[in-house]
Image (tube, helix red, strand yellow):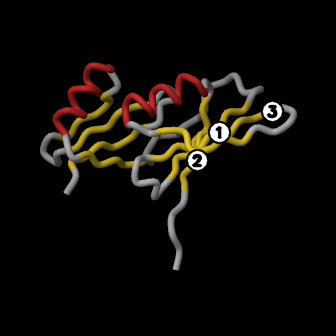
Amino acid sequence: MFKMIHMNINVLDLDKSLAFYEKALGLKEKSRLVPEDNSFIIVYLTDPTDSFQLELTYLRDRTEAYNLGDNEFHLAFSTPDFEKAHALHKEMGVICYENPAMGIYFISDPDGYWLEVLPEK
């Protein structure tokens, strides 16, 4: 038996990403790993249920954007107040795709990763 623990994404601007994930999705920093040489920083974010973590990895010497290919992968989030979330994300200008027929939409983080938002069931 296995339990999912976390998913990693690499980010270019850690502060910008942390601000985005807190404002857009309510994720908070749970822990952080910084080696003595400061060559990278790993930050674990979690939601209030603390059941799954998003790992943000910042590489100090990385300057070019990450190649996300066709960006056919995503992480999904549910919310009990879908309309309020949609309004916030629209105000933030981060909605990158909507599918009203399916009742879902996607937002894009500062590095271009897509995040699905759907109503809680």
Q: Could you tell me which residue is drawn at 76 percent across and 38 percent down? A: 34
- Which label belongs to residue 8? 2
Cα–Cα gap, marks 1 and 3: 11 Å
- Which label belongs to residue 57? 1
Q: Given the current orientation, which residue lies at the most extreme right position? A: 37
Vertical placement of 74 versus 90: above or below?
A: below
Q: Could you tell me which residue is drawn at 47 percent across and 36 percent down? A: 113
Q: Amino acid at mark 1?
A: Thr
Marked residue nearer the N-terminal end (2 or 1): 2
- Which label belongs to residue 39? 3
Q: Amino acid at mark 2?
A: Asn
Vertical placement of 52 versus 115: above or below?
A: below
Where, by quadrant of the figure, is residue 41 drawn? top right
Q: Amino acid at mark 3?
A: Ser
Vertical placement of 97 versus 103: above or below?
A: above
Q: Nearer the viewer, residue 100 or 77?
A: 77
Residue 80 pos. (x, y %): 21, 46
Q: Secondary structure at mark 3?
A: loop
Marked residue nearer the N-terminal end (1 or 3): 3
Q: Secondary structure at mark 2?
A: strand
| Left or right: 53, with 78 as reference point | right
| Left or right: 113, with 34 as reference point | left
Where, by quadrant of the figure, is residue 36 drawn? top right
- Which label belongs to residue 97? none
Q: Given the current orientation, which residue lies at the most extreme left position? A: 101
Marked residue nearer the N-terminal end (2 or 3): 2
Q: Could you tell me which residue is drawn at 54 percent across and 60 percent down? A: 5
Q: Could you tell me which residue is drawn at 26 percent across and 26 percent down? A: 88
Mark 2 vs 1: CB contact within 8 A: yes
Where, by quadrant of the figure, is residue 23 drawn? top left
